[in-house]
Image (cartoon, rainbow, N blue to C red):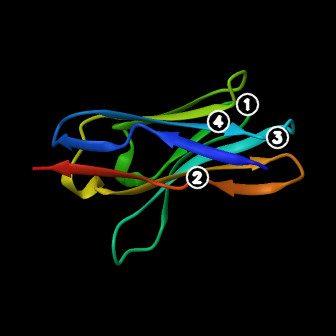
C-alpha cells in the first residue's frame, strides 16, 4: 500500500540545476528518515543525502555544497535541490523512506542526465 512517487528528473547542462521531489502515499504511519540514493551503470547504489524527521541532514562528500535535501512533513514529501550539476552526477536517482513500523520503501527511480 505504501508508495513513493518521484518527479523532477530530466536532462540538464553542466552547471545547471534540478529539483527532485518524492511523495509518500498510502500510509498513515509516521515517516522517519528519508533520503535520496543514486546508481550509475556498473556502479553500486550510493547514498546521496538523508534527512531525519527532526531535520538533521547528511550528504555524500561528492555533493556537499551543491545539493540540499529538505522535507515537508505535512505533505509527506522529500526534495533534493541539485545545483552546479556535473556530468558525473548522471545516474538514476531513488528516494526512500522509513515508514513507521512498516520499514523502508523505495521509489521507482528517475533518470538525471547532465550533459557537458
> Which badge, 1 or 2, comes first in the chain's sequence?
1
- Closer mark to the observer between disc 1 and disc 3: 3
Judging by the rendered image, the residue that carries numbered circle 4 is 56
> Horizontal placement of 81 versus 18: left or right?
right
Where residue 88 appears, as percent x and y from the top left, is 24, 58
Q: In this view, does 73 lie above or below 8?
A: above
Judging by the rendered image, the residue that carries numbered circle 3 is 27
Residue drawn at 73 percent across, 34 percent down: 53
- Closer mark to the observer between disc 2 and disc 4: 2
Residue drawn at 72 percent across, 38 percent down: 25
Instruction: Pick out the residue farthest to the top.
Output: 74
Judging by the rendered image, the residue that carries numbered circle 2 is 107
Residue 13 location, quadrant: top left
Q: What element carries label 1?
A: loop
- Closer mark to the observer between disc 3 and disc 4: 3
> Which badge, 2 or 4, comes first in the chain's sequence?
4
Where residue 62 appears, as percent x and y from the top left, is 35, 53
Q: Pointers 1 and 4 in contact (CB under 8 A)?
A: yes
Q: Pointers 2 and 4 in contact (CB under 8 A)?
A: no
Amino acid at each position: 500500500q505504501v508508495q513513493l512517487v518521484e518527479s523532477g528528473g530530466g536532462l540538464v547542462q553542466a552547471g545547471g540545476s534540478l529539483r527532485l521531489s518524492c511523495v509518500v502515499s498510502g500510509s498513515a504511519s509516521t515517516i522517519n528518515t528519508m533520503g535520496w540514493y543514486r546508481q550509475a551503470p556498473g556502479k553500486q547504489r550510493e547514498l546521496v543525502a538523508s534527512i531525519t524527521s527532526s531535520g538533521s541532514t547528511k550528504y555524500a562528500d561528492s555533493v556537499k555544497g551543491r545539493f540540499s535535501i529538505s522535507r515537508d512533513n505535512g505533505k509527506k514529501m522529500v526534495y533534493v535541490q541539485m545545483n552546479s550539476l556535473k556530468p558525473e552526477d548522471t545516474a538514476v536517482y531513488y528516494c526512500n523512506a522509513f515508514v513507521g513500523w512498516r520499514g523502508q520503501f523505495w521509489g521507482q527511480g528517475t533518470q538525471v542526465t547532465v550533459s557537458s
